[in-house]
Amino acid sequence: MNILRFSDLCARGDAAGKRVFIRADLNVPQDDAGRITEDTRVRASVPCIEMALKAGAAVMVTSHLGRPTEGEFKPADSLLPVADRLAELLGREVPLVSNWVDGVDVAPGQVVLLENCRLNKGEKKNDPALAQKLARLCDIFVHDAFGTAHRAEASTYGIAQYAPVACAGPLLSAEIDAIGKALADPKRPLAAIVAGSKVSTKLTILKALADKVDQLIVGGGIANTFMLAAGLPIGKSLAEPDLLDQARAVIEAMRARGAAVPIPTDVVVAKEFKASAEATVKRAEDVADDDLILDIGPETAKALAAQLEAAGTIVWNGPVGVFEFDAFAHGTETIARAIAKSKAFSIAGGGDTLAAIAKYGIEKDVGYISTGGGAFLEILEGKTLPAFEILEKRAAG
């Protein structure tokens, strides 16, 4: 992908003394008291900010947080907790600036955090007047928020149209490189794990991957629909019977290429959906009418693990069972451990996937962990993200 990278600008000395506007993704979870409960995104934003400061730039950083109403400030929408955490991580004061659209006072070697950009009227709809005002604040715009790369908003797309220079920060650049390595030029076999409650939400992804991958592993409610399509009983499990033809089409598309969608041979069932429910392993063909399938069985998990350990590239989106309940977590843990053990390049994305990675402590064993949920899914669908499109356009002149 031909885009300008901020690291190259800094290496050439082109950021010294310049006003640099960084769009980061600091949309972190908070408790009722406003305390940050998980700061991965804040920590991920630090390298870009440090790069800009080291280069001698005057640094402005902004992000959205939650879903505020444009033009209506409420304390719960404030980035103040993020400013405090950034100050700790950077070891320096990070002032929070409100009402910043018409001008920001920041000197080279300083960094300020600009209050929640979604409070600005016209942000979500990418209002050209707002985008032009944002662009006038800076000499260099740096997009470093992959989690927002699938949205064309004033602080992600519009500003990139009008800023004197628009480029990708280190986090966005790393996402581009990892996705390219996994999908554009993968080492084979290429295995993809796509799991979730509904086929309908992942159907376009499944169809797109059916043309690319050697193994398409489905899990969760999606696997139930594929089991039904293969003529297996699923009891009262979550599934989408109206999409059986679509599921069969994906199976046939894979088969036509000599590839496969492995269908579970055994499953873990319960009579009710709760953590204390009794878990029973059954052959796939023996699922009773009142059974709920809540995980893949040990035989299936072992077979999939062997495939993953032999893979060249792995794309992982979604746990294969209800891993939040320990009795139904074995399948997801087996998959996670196999990915960690595999010599394959692996890329993982999606909130539940990241939760599973954290639960089993395999962060260091996954090749790349994507910070974007919706953006990661749209990439898997084969879509061109607005952020990539505008940065490519700007790089081409």
Image (cartoon, helix red, strand yellow):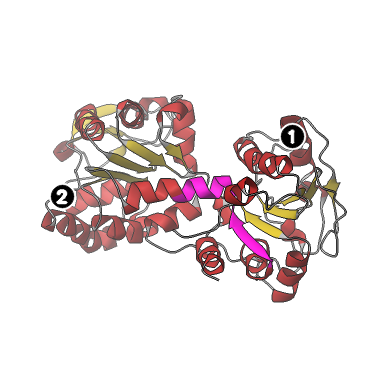
Task: Please provide percent x and percent y for residue 285.
Answer: 14, 40
Q: Secondary structure at mark 2?
A: loop
Report the quarter where the N terminus lies: bottom left
Looking at the picture, does residue 320 appear above or below residue 256?
above
Q: Which residues are magenta?
A: 163-176
Q: Secondary structure at mark 1?
A: helix
Residue 235 seen in the current view? no
Report the quarter where the C terminus lies: bottom right
Q: Is residue 184 left or right of residue 8?
A: left
What residue sits right under mark 1 in the picture? 85
Q: Quadrant of residue 279?
A: top left
Q: Quadrant of residue 128?
A: bottom right
Q: Is residue 216 left or right of residue 48?
A: left
First reached walking from the N terminus: tag 1 or tag 2: 1
Q: Residue at x 66, y 33 (%)?
A: 37
Q: Which residue type carries mark 1?
A: Arg
Q: Residue at x 44, y 32 (%)?
A: 356
Task: Please provide percent x and percent y for residue 69.
Answer: 74, 61
CA separation, marks 1 and 2? 47 Å
Assess whether mark 2 and mark 1 are in contact (beta carbons under 8 angstroms): no
What residue sits right under mark 2 in the picture? 259
